[in-house]
Amino acid sequence: MPIVYLDRDALDALKDDYGVTITTVLIKPKSRGEVRLASADPAAMPLVSPNLLKHPDDMQAMIDGQRFFLRAFDEKPLAERTRGIVSPDPADLSDEALRTHCKRFVKTNYHPASTARMGADGDRMAVLDARLRVRGVDGLRVCDMSAVPNINAGNTTAPAMMLGDRCADLIMGRL
């Protein structure tokens, strides 16, 4: 079966052929986004800026990941089964071209975390205390992955369930 490295815009080039998309994803990004209020109106949508790939180390890791896969498709056994690379453009694999390609196809993989982190009283970035209570707001706790101080390097299901269980214990006075 032929394998072709492609992206969404390259599907027309394949017609009735096989293809594969390879994606590099940062497990521990250094870039940090922000969520801000748009106004005092509680119905107004917040301003969300994920700032994906803003930290230069994140972009370099993405470029390095692309180069790794490009080399893999250029060597046996994949090279024997590959007809060609559709995207990024094989005629220009410069750092700048790969940077543009990475910016165009960056994604999060839907495991957001650390948006309302818990931490010590002196931590100015910690929205939550150690009992998952929102500082400055009585009666409100956060018990999802936004409470985690650092993004974990795996699926978020198990830690999310643990946080929910722990928060239930805190609310019920069992801890």
Image (cartoon, rainbow, N blue to C red):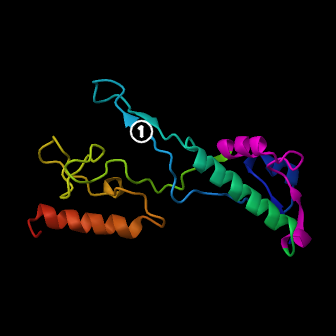
Under mark 1, the amino acid is Glu
Measured from the top left, where is residue 127 in percent x and y? 26, 46
Q: Quadrant of the N terminus?
A: bottom right
Tell me if 32 is positioned left or right of 7 in this view: left
**Would residue 2 be seen by someone viewing this image from the given angle?**
no
Q: What secondary structure is found at the residue carrying circle 1?
A: strand
For disc 1, the neighbor class at 10 Å (few under 14, some 14 to 19, many from 20) is few
Residue appearing at x 36%, y 26% in the figure: 38
The quarter of the displayed image where residue 84 is located: bottom right
Measured from the top left, where is residue 39 in percent x and y? 32, 24
In magenta segment, residue 29: no
Measured from the top left, where is residue 57 in percent x and y? 59, 49
Q: Write the start and end of the magenta stretch as one range.
A: 78-104
Measured from the top left, where is residue 85 in percent x and y? 85, 56
Tell me if 66 is positioned left or right of 106 in this view: right
Q: Quadrant of the C terminus?
A: bottom left
The quarter of the displayed image where residue 47 is located: top left
Q: Is residue 156 above or below residue 137?
A: below
Residue appearing at x 56%, y 40% in the figure: 54
In magenta segment, residue 99: yes
Q: Is residue 2 above or below residue 88?
A: below
Residue at mark 1:
34
Tell me if 172 is positioned left or right of 95 in this view: left
The residue sitting at the left extreme is 173
Residue appearing at x 38%, y 33% in the figure: 46
